Image (cartoon, rainbow, N blue to C red):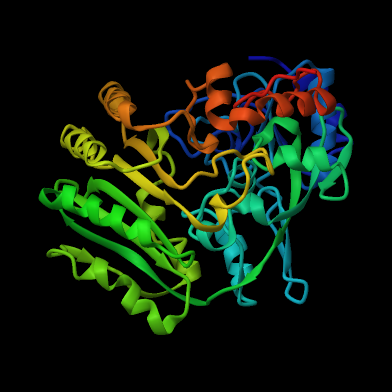
Amino acid sequence: MADVSSAVSGLSKNFSGRLLLPGDIDWETARRVHNGLVDKRPALIAQCLGAADIAAAVRFAREQSLEIAVRGGGHNVSGRGTIDDGIVIDLSPLKYTLVDPKARTARVGGGTLWGHLNRETQAHGLATTGGVVSTTGVAGLTLGGGLGWLSPKFGNALDNLLGVEIVLADGRIARASADENPDLFWAVRGGGGNFGAVSSFEFRLHPLGPMATGGLIAWPAADARETLRLFRDLADKASDDVSLVAALMTAPDGVTKIAAMAAGYFGPSAVAERVVKPIRSFGRPIMDTLGPITYEEINTRFDASLPRGARNYWKSQFCEELSDAAIDAMVECQKTCPSPMSMILIEHFHGAATRIAPVKTAFALRARGFNALVLSQWSAPDGDTACIRWARETFAALGPFVRPSVYVNYLDQDDTGAAALALAYGSNVQRLKSIKAKYDPQNVFHVNVNIPPEA
């Protein structure tokens, strides 16, 4: 591990936050990310209180020839918010949400979690698209695209982004918006952390809530094929007010395999029951939590399914159609799943997020269809081999039914290089490389799904 302790005293003179070295109190906790499979040991963790701290940390890293990882919420499955021997620019102290209810905007710190943002915006009867798990960080989710319950109604998180404050590779603090550095603004909307460390975000807000309709309903695994066909049929007819996700998973008892559907309805309450009736009237559900619920609670309902510290390995790709053959493959793969914490998720893409041209932002996944995520999750190291193998074998079994496109936030640590870029960005890759060359020609910010600089 690099020894930077002798140089840290110089940095501390121009740093307002905390600088944690190995052996310091809280270093062990601070180095951990959400995915317990990731176990990295940085030489320094710089817990920043503002953009000036971030800029000082970037300059220090470059002076000391340290690699940089930027951590927002630390939820990224690949663990790219930490690094061995380098410096972690930790934005977790930057948690704030400042709402302007008249302008319907919110300014949000780079370490803010979606649960915090939702709480503050809902106090004014406002919302913007965020993650489906409240402990996810605003920064990573938004920069990679930002899929959420409100994507069909309002577009993804990045589609509601009005501007960012960002610390560039040379330590300069810049703003990117439609009017300032518009090329950089195009790139950060989907390009991940390749272009700098974002200290704050400004979002457009929409009137919503506090009440909506949502929840989870589940059936026995014996009904899985029919459940997924119902999900497909409902998805085909879904309005922008409806958000649907299906899952093949294990019940809370840790033994019983089930087929489930999660739904969110964000339209007029007078017709909510009519919208969810086809789901509730199907078969003989063994679990039914669909009903009136606050929007804020919808975004916390599934937090327990993704506990901090669990070991995770994910594979995903996009299906334009959920064919009977694809459904059969998923059902068969569920039967061999070795962990009750694992699942196969099918997210429906439709509505506002799919009506935006792929070239309008760096985020290129704009087609209608289904995102198939093999979410392998387990609790202890002795499950590593079997659970990773199951994810890879399931992913391979779905290969005949997918197209070469993927949500960048679901790429795991072994998804790298030109192949990963092509899957994530399609025809936008070359423009991203050119913008990278302009703002980070030495590829300082490369601990991500890396876009190399290229003129």
Q: Compare residues 12 and 180 and report the one nearer the observer.
A: 180
Q: In which quarter of the image is the N terminus?
A: top right
Residue, x 65% and y 53% (percent of image)? 159
In the rendering, at what x and y percent does residue 204 appear? 70, 62
Q: Compare residues 246 and 366 and report the one nearer the observer.
A: 366
Left or right? Give the position of 214 relative to 286. Answer: right
In the rendering, at what x and y percent does residue 344 appear? 30, 41
In the rendering, at what x and y percent does residue 78 appear? 50, 30
Residue, x 42% and y 31% (percent of image)? 403
* Location of residue 336 with respect to 133 vertically, above or below: above
Q: Can the viewer see residue 390?
A: yes
Q: In which quarter of the image is the C terminus?
A: top right
In the rendering, at what x and y percent does residue 210 appear? 52, 77
Q: Can the viewer see residue 251?
A: no
Q: Compare residues 24 and 281 and report the one nearer the observer.
A: 281
* Location of residue 401 with respect to 361 vertically, above or below: above
| Residue 289 in which image quadrant | bottom left
Left or right? Give the position of 9 relative to 391. Answer: right
